[in-house]
């Protein structure tokens, strides 16, 4: 195969890969496990918590450790409906089942998985507004 023909073949393939790669990469997180690697679809992640220089990703009652800061993960998953609950936790808004006031004025989000996450005082307004907005918006197809 000539170099020009190879370049002509690769050009549309490269364009197609560039167009689809970012969105597909952002819709899943790959974590390393003792048995290899596991792909976690972002829509199935319940919440993410900071664990020193790592992040612990919770999905379906199981957790996976990922060597990435919470800040970096927040940048990746924000577009998929995640919001900061407090400095050590990100919550998927679609998984919030209930927002309730607890003793001493603490706001707590109960997730579909049953986990209760405290909402920081500084983030209460934005968190509650995001949950209300999600509840009022029509379902996506």
Image (tube, grey):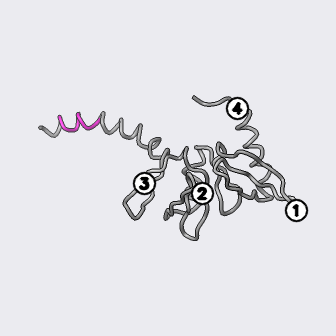
According to the picture, the residue beneath numbered tag 3 turns out to be: 38
Q: What residue is drawn where x is 39% and y is 57%?
A: 37
C-alpha gap between disc 1 and disc 4: 32 Å
N-term-proximal mark, 2 vs 1: 2
C-alpha gap between disc 2 and disc 3: 16 Å
N-term-proximal mark, 4 vs 2: 2
C-alpha gap between disc 4 and disc 2: 24 Å
Q: Is residue 115 above or below residue 23?
A: below
Q: Residue pushed farthest right?
A: 104
Q: What residue is drawn where x is 79% and y is 53%?
A: 124
Q: Secondary structure at mark 1?
A: helix
Number of residue marks: 4
Q: Secondary structure at mark 3?
A: strand
Q: Is residue 127 left or right of residue 45?
A: right
Q: Are marks 2 and 3 in contact (CB under 8 Å)?
A: no
Instruction: Return the x and y of residue 8 as percentages of the image width and height.
Output: 23, 34
Residue 126 located within the stretch drawn in magenta: no
Q: Are marks 4 and 2 in contact (CB under 8 Å)?
A: no
Q: Is residue 68 left or right of residue 33?
A: right
According to the picture, the residue beneath numbered tag 4 turns out to be: 137
Q: Residues within 10 Å of mark 1 (few under 14, many from 20)?
A: few
Residue 7 located within the stretch drawn in magenta: yes
The magenta stretch spans which residues?
Answer: 5-11
Q: Residues within 10 Å of mark 3 (few under 14, many from 20)?
A: some
- Main SS category, magenta section: helix
């Amino acid at each position: 195969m000539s170099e020009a023909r190879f370049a002509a073949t690769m050009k549309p393939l490269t364009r197609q890969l560039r167009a689809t790669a970012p969105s597909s990469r952002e819709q899943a997180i790959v974590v390393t496990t003792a048995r290899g690697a596991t792909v976690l679809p972002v829509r199935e992640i319940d919440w993410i918590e900071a664990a020193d220089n790592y992040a612990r990703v919770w999905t379906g009652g199981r957790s996976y450790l990922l060597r990435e800061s919470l800040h970096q993960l927040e940048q990746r998953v924000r577009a998929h409906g995640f919001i900061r609950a407090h400095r050590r936790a990100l919550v998927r808004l679609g998984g919030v089942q209930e927002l309730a006031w607890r003793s001493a004025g603490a706001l707590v989000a109960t997730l579909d998985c049953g986990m209760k996450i405290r909402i920081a005082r500084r983030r209460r307004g934005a968190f509650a507004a995001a949950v209300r907005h999600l509840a009022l918006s029509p379902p996506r197809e």
